[in-house]
Image: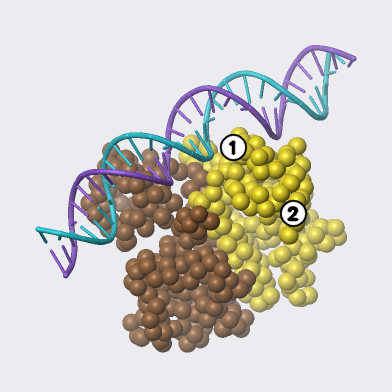
Chain colours: A yellow, B brown, C cyan, D purple
Amino acid sequence: MNKLLRLNSREKNILVKTPIMASLGPSALTKMLDLATAVNYESRDILFREGEEAESFYCVLSGYVRLYRLNKDGREADIRICGPGDTFAECLLYLGPNYRYNAQAAENVTLARFDIARVRAAAEQDVDISRAIMQSLANHLLTTMDCVANDRLQTAPQRVAHFLLTSCPKESTSASIRLPFQKSLLAGKLGLAPEALSRAFSALRRAGVTVRGRLIQINDVNALKQI
Amino acid sequence: MNKLLRLNSREKNILVKTPIMASLGPSALTKMLDLATAVNYESRDILFREGEEAESFYCVLSGYVRLYRLNKDGREADIRICGPGDTFAECLLYLGPNYRYNAQAAENVTLARFDIARVRAAAEQDVDISRAIMQSLANHLLTTMDCVANDRLQTAPQRVAHFLLTSCPKESTSASIRLPFQKSLLAGKLGLAPEALSRAFSALRRAGVTVRGRLIQINDVNALKQI
DNA sequence: CGGGTGCTTGATACCGATCAACCCACGTGG
DNA sequence: CCACGTGGGTTGATCGGTATCAAGCACCCG
């Protein structure tokens, strides 16, 4: 981490377009902007660890953040990958005082930081704010339930196909995608070892998926849906 | 399903002790009780299916409900098992108009049903209600994240051990537990096939776990923690 | 006593983790 | 300019864990 500052105007512009802020009315929006500070981390920096006292929650302005858990042998499992516009740890607004997972910068990131106690107070007074928080929580809950279902129902190639399909523009018959982050991060997001992701990609070649670096060419979107 | 009625006093008594209702002030509580109707389902009844339009969310008064998803070959995966006091589908209060998973009665159940639109309106006017919803959402989000992490980090015996430990009274050195539902339901909850649960139990015998029907005897709680 | 249901046990197959080696692109310094 | 190291990714061989299929068992209730 380094300096902790008011947001500059560029950062403000990003923040206000964020899902959690976009639905706010003008007065709620200024309240929230007043509470936000900007903070930067470098790749691999730890933002916080499981068990630490939670003072802040965050909204990603640029870069990617890994939320993950450790088992007692030190193995890591990603729970969620947060990109620009994503909010995390806001569930602690109404829960216990400790972080429940680790957070690490997957690359250089800029975040908006919010003081939990202050936002909680603001939400009590402003329905706009509590509605926005509920929407965010509800969204994360559904995404996470999707994740459980996908982990339990889909094989590695199916997960990758599913991910690619959600990255395609709707209603397209073919597409080319640029991964927004490293493959190893994608592997973690899908609950796979990097090797398994690699093999899944090569299994998808027969379905018309070509991979070169971060560039992915999908010849037949419908074929992918059949996987 | 059968009749849909105002709650009788026994049901009201259960409902008000429920996490989502317990934190409400008197006026919010009466508002919510006014909105609740009681509904019964028999074992294996389908409450709703993924994709159907969502009019209601539910709170379990007695029995157990399975939330699950299907893949395209018809295989099922449980996402969550809801028991007495649990609320489900409340995430749709602020989201799309359709259920995102299937819900089935795992045994005969009694539920409190809430109309989504009306509760949404009530939450706009009463901070108590929206705070209660946020707490519920935040709780489910964390539980579901736990679920993802456990699926990705733990083997079958570890999952079972973890489940048993959370069912033990805190700070006890030995315990005996009665499963509140069928083993096949527990298997689904833990993301296992029933056979795998069975084998996990027999693997735990060496750690001092004895199983007879729904009764489970744990000789050494600390040994379980080492699994 | 017969039949159903829920559970266990065994045999097998599959999937993905793990370990190890290698490849490639890139940057650095001699 | 080349030798080297580093980090990210791929590929192959192996192992372990769990699903799946099939059969058998225990209990309950008529």
The image quadrant of residue D5 is top right
Location of mark 1 (residue): A196
Report crowding for label 1: few under 14, some 14 to 19, many 20 or more residues within 10 A (C-alpha).
Answer: some
Q: Which mark is residue B136?
A: none
Give the percent coordinates (x, y) of residue D28: 18, 63
Please identify, in this view, whether the residue under mark 2 or under mark 1 is nearer the observer.
Answer: 2
Q: Is residue B50 above or below residue D11?
A: below
Under circle 2, the secondary element is loop
Under circle 1, the secondary element is helix
The image quadrant of residue C10 is top left
Give the percent coordinates (x, y) of residue B195: 34, 47
Residue at position x 77%, y 42% from top? A215
Residue at position x 63%, y 46% from top? A160
Dots 2 and 1 on the same chain: yes
Location of mark 2 (residue): A173
The residue type indicated by label 2 comes to: Thr
Is any part of residue A91 visible from this angle?
no
Q: Where, quadrant-wise, is the N terminus of chain B in this rendering?
A: bottom left
Residue at position x 75%, y 41% from top? A214
Report crowding for label 2: few under 14, some 14 to 19, many 20 or more residues within 10 A (C-alpha).
Answer: few
Q: Is residue B75 above or below residue A20?
A: above
Q: Where, quadrant-wise, is the C terminus of chain B in this rendering?
A: top left
Q: As rendered, which of B16 and A140 lies closer to the eye?
A: A140
Left or right of A95, for residue A30: right
Residue at position x 35%, y 55% from top? B184
The image quadrant of residue A61 is bottom right
User: Which mark sits nearer the N-terminus, 2 or 1?
Assistant: 2
Q: Chain of mark 1?
A: A
Q: Is residue B142 above or below residue B14?
A: above
The residue type indicated by label 1 comes to: Ala
- Per the model, the C-alpha gap separating discs 2 and 1 is 27 Å
